[in-house]
Image (cartoon, rainbow, N blue to C red):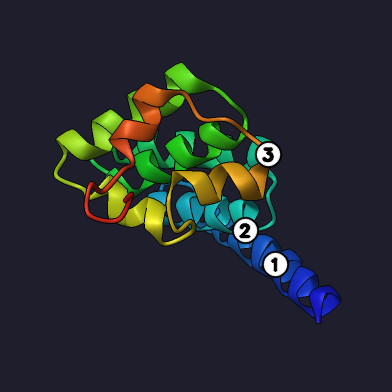
Amino acid sequence: MTAKINKDYEKAVYYFTEAIKIRPDQAAAYYNRGLVYSKMREWTNAIPDYDKAIKLDPNYAQAYINRGAAWLHKEGWDKAKSDLTTARDMGSDIVASFHNDYENVAHFEQKTGIKMPDEIAAMLTDADSEV
């Protein structure tokens, strides 16, 4: 099953890359390819795609959220905090977005082996669910 999923991701990267060749001005194509790279845990490839999506559309809040999440995985704490703050200031629910992938901060830390700084953990904590 994993091999099929990986092939599907590889196909998705290919098709988004082709879409970018046709319409390099479309932020969504870069964002979506970044999402695929994130699903593949290829943060180093995902971040430049989110960068480009944000450059093309500076109001793309979800791109800030996902780039911030990628920075969490790379332990780029200042960049993660900046992106998550920007998305939150744009009105996005960064806690809900975080909970799409992780039950809570402890789950993130257990799953990734990365200890999140308290300040960032607090940003991603829903007081009702962290009891």
**Which tag is nearer the camera, tag 1 or tag 3?**
3
Compute the Cα span from label 2 to label 1. Answer: 8 Å
Judging depth in this view, the residue of 65 and 20 nearest the camera is 65
Residue 117 in sight here: yes
Q: Amino acid at mark 2?
A: Lys
| 73, above or below 102, in the image | above
Q: Which mark is residue 61?
A: none
Residue drawn where x is 26% and y is 48% of the image: 126
Q: Amino acid at mark 1?
A: Tyr
**Which tag is nearer the camera, tag 2 or tag 1?**
2
User: Which of the two labelled residues, at mark 2 and mark 3, occupies the earlier sequence position?
Assistant: 2
Q: Amino acid at mark 3?
A: Gly
User: Which of the two labelled residues, at mark 1 and mark 3, occupies the earlier sequence position?
Assistant: 1
**Contact flag, marks 1 and 3 (Cβ < 8 Å):** no
Judging depth in this view, the residue of 71 and 51 nearest the camera is 71
Residue drawn where x is 39% and y is 33% of the image: 121
**Contact flag, marks 2 and 1 (Cβ < 8 Å):** yes
Residue drawn where x is 65% and y is 44% of the image: 112
| Image quarter of residue 83 | top left
Local secondary structure at mark 3:
loop
Quadrant where the image shows the N terminus? bottom right
Residue, disc 3: 113
| 12, above or below 93, in the image | below
Residue, disc 1: 9
